[in-house]
Amino acid sequence: MDTNLVLVIILILGIIVKNDSLIFSAAVLLGTRIFKLDGLLDLIDNYSVKLGIVLIMLGVLSPLATEELKIEGGLTSLLEPLAIVGIIMGIAVTQFTREGIWLMETDPTVTVNLVLGIIFGVAFFNGLPSGPLIASGITAVLYRLFA
């Protein structure tokens, strides 16, 4: 199947489910292919995940910088059950990400399936795209458990 056609289908899915990030991503990638902006496509391919992680961290940390989130309140709640689970899940996600990078380097074809699953999750289950790294990490861990 033609890559441009796949991107058009993703764009249409994004429009149907009214998901701006899916629409924007598909449109930008389709535009880079149509206008043969290979240099831009290479930049997106090489740096967008890193940039995305930086932007997510900025968003997560900004309430601290704006003083919307007080350090004192956060430190006193460290022993509450929700805080403990949050810390454990934060650690777990970093491990999933490490495993995800391993899987994507070991078997790059799995990326297509992960992206397809993310698109279906966004398009049909009202999910939010978290990215293939976490999905790949969970896939790697589950695969190792059941293989």
Image (cartoon, grey):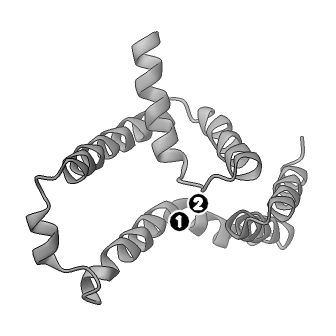
Q: Quadrant of residue 64?
A: bottom left
Q: Residue type at mark 2?
A: Asp
Give the numbered dot on residue 45: 2
Q: Position of residue 24 (x, y in %)?
A: 73, 71
**In terms of secondary structure, where does tag 1 sit?**
helix
In this rendering, position of residue 110 left or right of residue 20: left
Q: Looking at the image, which is closer to me, 64 or 38?
A: 64
- Total count of labels: 2
Q: Looking at the image, which is closer to me, 103 or 115?
A: 115
Q: Quadrant of residue 53?
A: bottom left
Res 41 visible: yes
Q: Residue at x 71, y 48 (%)?
A: 119
Q: Residue at x 21, y 54 (%)?
A: 83
Dot 2: within a 10 Å radius of its alpha carbon, few (fewer than 14), some, or many (20 or more) residues? few
Q: Position of residue 120 (x, y in %)?
A: 73, 44
Dot 1: within a 10 Å radius of its alpha carbon, few (fewer than 14), some, or many (20 or more) residues? few
Check the image and name the residue furthest to the front.
Answer: 80
In this rendering, position of residue 120 left or right of residue 66: right
Q: Residue type at mark 1?
A: Ser
Residue located beneath label 1 in the image: 48
**In terms of secondary structure, where does tag 2 sit?**
helix
Q: Residue at x 54, y 52 (%)?
A: 131
Q: Relative to 1, does residue 142 appear above or below in the rendering?
A: above
* Distance from Cα at disc 2 to Cα at disc 1: 6 Å
Q: Relative to 124, does residue 75 appear above or below in the rendering?
A: below
Q: Position of residue 19 (x, y in %)?
A: 73, 65
Res 105 visible: no
Q: Quadrant of residue 67?
A: bottom left
